Image (spheres, helix red, strand yellow):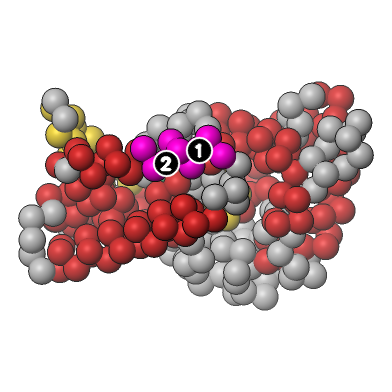
Amino acid sequence: MSDEEQLLQYQAYQLQAHDVATHSSRTMSYLRRLHIKAGKRIDVWDELTAHRAASDSGVTGPAIKRAFRSFVGNLQGNRCCYCRRWLQNIAHAKPVEHILCRKDYPQFSLHFYNLAVACFDCNLLKKDAKWGSVAVLSINYPVAANINDFYHPRFHRYPEHVSYERTERDDICNVTYTGLTPQGKHLCDQLLYITAARENFFSNNPSIAEAMVSLQQFQDRHAPGELPALEAFRKSLNESMHKQLDNSALDGLPLKGRRAAKSRTKV
Ligand SMILES: [Zn+2]
């Protein structure tokens, strides 16, 4: 993406930074103040989430995040920035993704181009992973043309880096991803193999998939953080499943998705 395209995109966002157009300029003032604070290597994301201005202003963290999800979600065609599955129409199922993770890069915790919208699975899988060689003490956000060692969903165009194929027949689904460039291959290695294996696993185990969906639906009826025990359980279950999927693939057990993805990618 060129500098000019980035500027145009940011200008468009400024006008849509809040659901209520008249609140957009006040929202941008608040975000600029927070952005200056982040520049001191302070992770401001939780502060944004908790922000509640005077009740008559309407400028709150949830409102700002909702507008951001809508704006960037539209740019992404309402698909996950990594696996390209459709994003469900509930906030909890489409978390805001920090491309350079908050843990290592707190100074970019609110940077417009460091944020994308992922699905729950990809966001959970990536977590605090540090991708690429961007120096952790960098003051300025890296230039798009210099990001060559990992896939950056806000700067790179997905079809140029990753090709994917999803076939469904009755209840069976098979997904494969192919990295086309070093950035795309890095994304496959770090994330998409396990995403494909997980999706294929669920399509072949409908009763487990149904139970997982029920848990998610129950959780979605509550605000984030309201059911900490259930959230911890789901997180632990996910991590355990990913380990199992990973080990099974290494043992040569039939994990069609991962093996297919890997063989195609290595062509
Ligand atoms: Zn995803």
Q: Which residue is mark 1?
A: 220
Q: Residues within 10 Å of mark 2 (few under 14, many from 20)?
A: some
> Where is residue 11 drawn, in percent x and y?
75, 35
Q: Which residue is mark 2?
A: 216
Report the span colored magenta.
214-222
Seen in the picture, residue 168 relative to 118 is either above or below; the reply is above
* Cα gap from disc 2 to disc 1, whole angstroms: 6 Å
> Where is residue 92 drawn, in percent x and y?
53, 41
Instruction: Tell whether position 220 is magenta.
Output: yes
Circle number at residue 23: none
> Where is residue 21 drawn, in percent x and y?
81, 24
Residue name at image x 80 percent, y 48 percent = 51
Q: Quadrant of residue 250?
A: bottom left
Amino acid at dot 2: Gln
Secondary element type, mark 2: helix
Q: Quadrant of the N terminus?
A: top right
Seen in the picture, residue 215 relative to 86 is either above or below; the reply is below
In front of the other: 199 or 106: 199
